[in-house]
Image: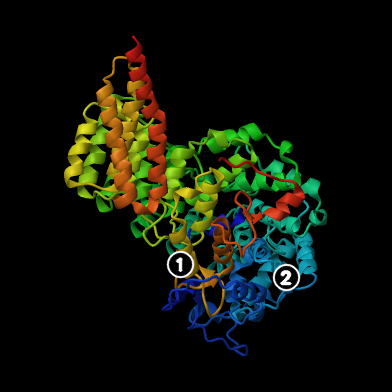
């Protein structure tokens, strides 16, 4: 039996160089996402729907277009996704997980409606996932990853409940994941990877431990991600991807070394990843767009100083004005 | 930041069963097993008639209308029904395979399959065969690797792992999930013996494979360690040999620097000379950066040695600053800011030092 497997993201089109930011098109793209004809991708990504909503809402807010989204429906959806154990699932009928618990809390912060959740139960859920060595499992099945350390402290920081976990042990575990090149992987010994580095620097910021980093060494590794095209990759000898404009750039901002990359060239690369017809950003110029890359393209441009976009917080990837309202100002190195 | 899950940049996989010509009026009954080219919806299968399928619930006020492919919605309608009834049966187990085939990233299906594996006391060796096939098709997915790990743990049998992972890596030598799984197996079951050789073979194939370099560091730090001078010398030699083959090699230089930075670059006799020699024929921005680090380290050490030659120090500083200038203006202009920063901070730290010493000497 033959199955035709094709990848939605690799229909490459010839693209003319795009050098301006098409904010209105991106707003239209996100506002219509999920209601368009090509729904198969939307269906397939149900298992991460909560994160998908977080990406969409955050980028809309950064573009000052949040009112176009359906606030009450989303809040009701989140309520229906909180399980008895306190954890939140990606969608209805799915199991709870730390990843989607964080996304849900981030969304509710955007909407100033954290009380839609049983907050105490969320905290219990997060606390229950911490292991003896300080690490965090993603869910009851026990996968350990520094991404989950970040999700745990970010969730608790947004709820103002960081003191409920063993922060020292959590820090100890994350530091044990620091590699010889100054970077971090998912577990001790794992290869340094920009996504993991973002999670670990964000984690260290939220726990007030940025001084434990070797900022010059890590900054060097991070600025080495920039390729001649101006784009950033996630580890040595790999291709550039617009989402690394976020993971790498935010990390550099957190450690106070964002000026070490060539901003003009990076901006050009990010803009080239837009799709003039459909709106949205793809991983690299010419590929298919999606909300994930759209958020990180816009957030990256915000970090680079684009004034048409709201300021974004590099630790939490949320609009700064939302965090100001909450009263959360994570540390940054200068 | 839940978005990190997708950073392996895998494209979303869509399977189109183009050869499945589905007719609702087909009365094939159980013959669908006999003729595998004819797919029958669950809703038409007699042995599933007792179960009420559960439609997708998009929340109290559906945000958007969703159009699924028919096969997908059929399978998942029945999956939801099974979950709702908490049914633990063979047919449920069989259905999870269909659900996984349609969407292997759906972590809830994998959870359920594991619950069933245990509840039904399924043959875990068979499950190993199954997960092997799935990973071969979709090797860049967190769920499949975590599932495999659980089965290996339940069986407490890692005997197939190294060979399997090697096979996956032969298709993509940098698969991040594969490497994590490999590290777990090796550490958990103490399978260190042949790993350095494995790493060297991979580096023979692609000397720029950063994952392999990382693995090299992993193996050595967990076995001999790096404190033995003979080991360090061996590794330096290895790095320089690889660099001669492919000078533009970020990973090799990162490895060398990472290994030496704590004990100090200038702690290695003759290393600076060897690098200077390489500079003539195998230069790269990484080599120059490494040279800079050597000079910086030398300056740091010279400050501590009271009788160090002041001229020598000035010369070292000058060479270091020249490197920064060369990199910023010519060899690595995209990182101009970084190189200029390095130059400035070196000047600040050591130029005054030298001047101070000159002044102090002058006062004696």
Report the colour scheme: rainbow
Q: Position of residue A235 (x, y in %)?
A: 42, 51
Q: Which residue is mark 1?
A: A284
Q: Position of residue A302 (x, y in %)?
A: 58, 59
The residue lying toward the viewer, choosing from B129 and A116, is: A116
Tell me if B164 is positioned left or right of B202 in this view. right
Query: Which of these two is toward me, B306 or B25?
Result: B306
Q: Is residue B62 left or right of residue B320?
A: right
Rendered position, B112 above or below A274: above
Callout 2: 10 Å neighbours few (<14), some, many (20+)?
some
Farthest residue, direction top: B364
On screen, residue A297 above or below B259: below
Q: In which quadrant of the rendered view does residue B171 lie?
A: bottom left
Looking at the image, which is closer to me, A197 or B141? A197
The vertical placement of A76 against A156, above or below, is below
Element type where label 1 sits in the image: loop
Residue B192: tell me if it is visible.
no
Q: Earlier in the sequence, mark 1 or mark 2?
A: 2
State the residue at coordinates (71%, 69%). Answer: B81
Q: Chain of mark 2?
A: A
Q: Nearer the viewer, residue B337 or B245?
A: B337
Residue beneath the point at 76% across and 51% down:
A325
Dot label at residue B96: none
Q: Position of residue A239 (x, y in %)?
A: 40, 60
Mark 1 on the same chain as mark 2: yes
Estimate the spatial distance between the alpha carbons at disc 1 and disc 2, rounded to whole Å.
27 Å
**Residue at image mark 2:** A69
């Amino acid at each position: 039996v033959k199955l035709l497997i094709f990848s939605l993201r690799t229909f490459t089109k010839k693209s003319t160089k795009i050098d301006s930011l098409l904010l209105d098109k991106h707003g239209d793209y996100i506002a219509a996402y999920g209601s368009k004809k090509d729904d198969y991708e939307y269906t397939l990504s149900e298992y991460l729907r909560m994160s998908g909503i977080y990406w969409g809402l955050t980028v809309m807010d950064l573009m000052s277009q949040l009112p176009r989204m359906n606030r009450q429906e989303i809040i009701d959806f989140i309520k229906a996704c909180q399980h008895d154990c306190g954890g939140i699932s990606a969608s209805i009928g799915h199991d709870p997980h730390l990843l989607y618990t964080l996304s849900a809390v981030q969304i509710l912060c955007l909407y100033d409606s954290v009380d839609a959740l049983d907050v105490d139960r969320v905290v219990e859920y997060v606390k229950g996932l911490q292991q003896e060595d300080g690490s965090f499992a993603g869910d009851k099945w026990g996968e350990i990853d520094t991404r989950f350390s970040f999700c745990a402290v970010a969730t608790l920081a947004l709820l103002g409940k960081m003191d409920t976990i063993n922060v020292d042990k959590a820090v100890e575990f994350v530091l044990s994941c620091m590699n010889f090149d100054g970077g971090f992987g998912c577990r001790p010994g794992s290869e340094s990877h920009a996504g993991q580095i973002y999670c670990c620097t964000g984690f260290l910021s939220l726990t007030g431990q940025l001084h434990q980093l070797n900022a010059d060494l890590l900054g060097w590794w991070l600025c080495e991600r920039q390729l001649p095209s101006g784009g950033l990759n996630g580890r040595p000898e790999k291709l550039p991807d617009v989402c690394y404009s976020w993971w790498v750039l935010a990390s550099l901002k957190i450690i106070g070394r964002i000026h070490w990359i060539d901003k003009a060239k990076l901006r050009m690369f990010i803009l080239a990843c837009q799709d003039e017809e459909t709106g949205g950003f793809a991983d690299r110029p010419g590929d298919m767009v999606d909300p994930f890359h759209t958020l990180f393209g816009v957030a990256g441009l915000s970090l680079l100083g684009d004034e048409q976009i709201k300021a974004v917080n590099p630790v939490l990837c949320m609009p700064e004005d939302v965090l100001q309202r909450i009263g959360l100002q994570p540390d940054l190195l200068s | 930041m839940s978005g990190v899950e997708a950073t392996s940049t895998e494209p979303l996989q869509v399977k189109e069963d183009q050869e499945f010509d589905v007719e609702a009026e087909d009365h094939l009954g159980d013959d669908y097993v006999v003729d595998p080219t004819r797919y029958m919806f669950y809703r038409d299968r007699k042995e599933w008639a007792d179960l009420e399928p559960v439609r997708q619930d998009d929340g109290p006020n559906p945000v958007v209308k969703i159009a699924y492919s028919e096969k997908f919605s059929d399978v998942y309608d029945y999956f939801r029904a099974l979950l709702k009834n908490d049914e633990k049966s063979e047919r449920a187990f069989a259905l999870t395979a269909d659900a996984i085939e349609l969407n292997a990233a759906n972590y809830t299906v994998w959870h359920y399959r594991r619950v069933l594996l245990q509840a039904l006391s399924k043959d875990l060796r068979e499950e190993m065969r199954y997960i092997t096939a799935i990973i071969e098709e979709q090797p860049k997915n967190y769920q499949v690797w975590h599932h495999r790990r659980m089965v290996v743990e339940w069986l407490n049998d890692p005997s197939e792992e190294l060979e399997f992972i090697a096979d996956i890596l032969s298709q993509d030598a940098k698969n991040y999930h594969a490497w994590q799984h490999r590290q777990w197996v090796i550490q958990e079951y103490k399978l260190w013996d042949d790993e350095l050789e494995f790493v060297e073979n991979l580096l023979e194939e692609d000397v720029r494979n950063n994952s392999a370099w990382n693995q090299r560091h992993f193996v050595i730090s967990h076995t001999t360690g790096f404190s033995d001078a003979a080991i360090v010398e061996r590794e330096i030699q290895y790095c320089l040999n690889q660099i001669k083959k492919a000078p533009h090699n970020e990973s090799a230089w990162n490895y060398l620097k990472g290994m030496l930075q704590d004990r100090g670059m200038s702690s290695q006799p003759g290393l600076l000379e060897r690098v200077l020699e390489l500079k003539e024929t195998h230069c790269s921005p990484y080599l120059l950066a490494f040279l800079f680090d050597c000079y910086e380290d030398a300056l740091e050490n010279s400050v501590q040695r009271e009788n160090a030659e002041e001229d020598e120090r000035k010369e070292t500083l000058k060479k270091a600053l020249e490197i920064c200038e060369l990199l910023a203006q010519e060899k690595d202009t995209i990182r101009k800011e970084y190189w200029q920063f390095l130059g400035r901070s070196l000047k600040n730290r050591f130029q005054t030092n030298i001047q101070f010493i000159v002044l102090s000497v002058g006062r004696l």
